[in-house]
């Protein structure tokens, strides 16, 4: 994307019902700091269940990603504190995913690459 990084997981390519998406701007501006948007944005299945930050840990494993939310994040997700998305990727696909997640979570302490 031109001004942001987007990493997403979905139940299917078209007519998606279930998805988990992370997004962040390449650069945060002063206004982002004031509005609380200088964070990684997370969205689950619909914009109603979304927010900036609110994550305790986002861990990439070889066959899944595990997201643990803090109180603020769980409130935005209707009380859900833990989400996992399983996948079966080639080593190249996992490398591409790893690179995207590193960029998306750069500078945030809660991202862990446990697939390395």
Image (spheres, helix red, strand yellow):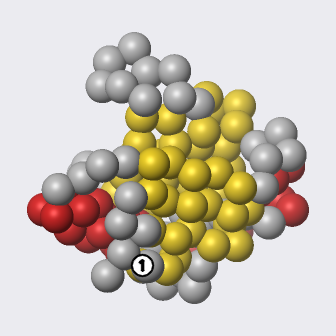
- Is residue 3 left or right of 67 when viewed as pictured? left
Residue 54's quadrant in the figure? bottom right
Residue 84, percent from left and from top: 57, 52
| Neighbourhood count class around disc 1 (C-alpha, 10 Å): few under 14, some 14–19, many 20 upward | some
Residue drawn at x 66%, y 43% is 50
Residue at point 24% right, 53% down?
89
Where on the picture, by quarter, is residue 56?
Answer: bottom right
Q: Is residue 50 above or below residue 97?
A: above
- Considering only vertical position in the picture, is 71 above or below 19? below
Asked if 42 appears above or below 36 in the picture, the reply is above
**Quadrant position of residue 63:** bottom left
Q: Most extreme residue toward the left, as rendered?
A: 92
- Mark 1 — residue? 113
Question: Is there any visible trace of residue 32 in the rendered image?
Answer: no
* Residue 38, percent from left and from top: 58, 68
Indicate the position of residue 29 as horizontal and vertical percent values.
50, 70
Q: In this rendered view, identify the residue nearer to me: 15 or 47.
A: 15
In this rendering, would 55 be left or right of 66? right
């Amino acid at each position: 994307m031109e001004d942001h990084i987007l990493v997403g997981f979905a139940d299917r390519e078209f007519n998606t019902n279930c998805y988990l998406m992370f997004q962040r701007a390449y650069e945060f501006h002063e206004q982002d700091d004031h509005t609380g948007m200088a964070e990684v944005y997370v969205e689950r299945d619909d914009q109603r269940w979304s927010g900036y930050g609110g994550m305790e840990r986002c861990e990439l494993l070889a066959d899944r990603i595990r997201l643990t939310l803090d109180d603020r994040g769980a409130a935005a997700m209707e009380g859900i504190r833990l989400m996992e998305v399983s996948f079966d990727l080639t080593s190249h696909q996992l490398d591409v995913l790893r690179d995207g997640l590193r960029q998306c979570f750069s500078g945030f302490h809660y991202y862990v690459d446990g697939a390395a």
